[in-house]
Amino acid sequence: MKTFLILGAGTAGTMMAREMAHALDLNQWKVIVVDKEEQHYYQPGFLFIPFGYYKRDDVVKPIRCFIAKGVEYVVSNIEALEPAENKVTLANGRVIQYDYLVIATGTDIHPEETEGLKDGGWGENIFDFYTYNGAAALAPAISRFQGGRFLVNVVENPIKCPVAPLEFIFLADAYFTRKGIRDKVEITYATPLPGAFTKPVAAAALGKILDEKHIHVEAEYNTGWVDPSRNTLVSYDERELPYDLMVSIPLNKGAAFLGAAGIADELNYVKVDKHTLQSTEYPNIWALGDAANIPASKAGAVIHFQMGTAVKNILAHMAGKPMPDAFDGHALCYIETGFDKATLIDFDYTHEPFPGKYPVPGVGPFDLLGQTTLNHWGKLAFRYIYFLMMRGIEVPLPNKFSMAGKRAA
């Protein structure tokens, strides 16, 4: 019997396991998914926890609820991958020989990589919201905050969900305003980017919102170290940013065993063809979602859009046929802008976000690059849609990017 092995039971791994359980003859194939966790996290929901929108039960569910029938689910850390031997060794001692491998192990934060970040105030006046525990610990800290210097810092790109730091700042601005202390809070956003975002049209629109909210952007800020004795963040060019409360988006990296296996870049993201999603070195290996080094956003919608391409190409490869599909880098991101409003951006490898309507051209109901209450409720409603997707319910959104309904600037 052949083995189709999936490493990671997050969004990408769960969806791929279900697709393969349906597409393959389970009398001839074993589908195995391995994850170190027993809980499935709705990671976009972490953003809302510090502000009281969500609680634990809203964003954390047992992984077993979403594992498709016929799929073997193994709970273990991964000790080693030996791609030349088609072999994975688990921390529990089990060795799995595979015929095809999909890597969907995601990305994690590494605050220990920045001097003074993890060992100088972490969990006291420095927090993250990219983990459930970090977001939960940040909630009482924000509630206690009565004013001062509030600093949000992206250490280095790429990061999971590139717009999340902006959303967090906009939600914080609204939170402090409603609390009646906004005039006592100095909000600064320190980013290695030259502006609010990477795409010029979206960067201009988001930058305008930051200006309107009197949020200072410290651009091209390459984080060097934290001086906890002075509550100061220092860049490599020695720009100093003092803080009373800092929210950090630390260095993001893929799983260490991928780097050790020789199939990943310096940040442990698997090197793949950005269109086929196939490993550039091993033809029976694919990487999906945050684990891949493709130049697309590391976000849940991107995983949804790339899934069809991956499944078609893997099945064609199994049959000895040319791979028929190409992923275009399609990304769709709701961006909370505070006060129960949000904007929406839709783009791919070659097209930047433009104004317009989505998903029905000219009709919507969602506005692209426009701040609306309906966009906000669309963002909140996606949590319910997400868990339906994890149970195998199809969401009828087109995988490919389209300029239909958009107005090019």
Image: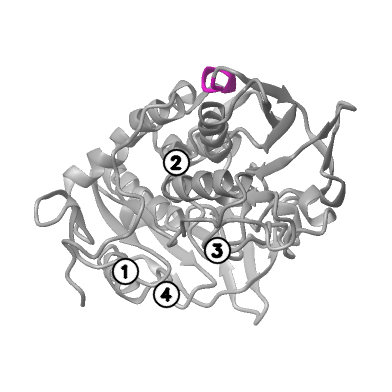
Q: Which residue lies furthest to the right in this view?
A: 93
In this figure, which residue is indicated by the disc labeled 4? Answer: 195
Residue 284 image position (x, y, % from top left): 70, 49
Viewer-nearest of discs 3 and 2:
3
Q: From the viewer's perspective, is residue 124 above or below residue 148?
A: above
Q: In this view, does 280 lie to the left or right of 331?
A: right
On the question of residue 53 being in view, the answer is no
Q: Is mark 3 on a helix, strand or loop?
A: loop
Query: Which label belongs to residue 276?
Result: none
Q: Nearer the viewer, residue 371 or 141?
A: 371
- Labelled disc at residue 44: 2
Vertical order, 157 against 235 (above or below): above
- Residue depicted at 25% across the width and 43% down the height: 376
Mark 3 in CB contact with mark 2 (< 8 angstroms): no
Secondary-structure class at tag 2: helix
Looking at the image, is mark 4 or mark 2 earlier in the sequence? 2
Q: Mark 1 points at which residue?
A: 202
Q: Is residue 348 left or right of residue 25?
A: left
Q: Label 4 amino acid? A: Gly
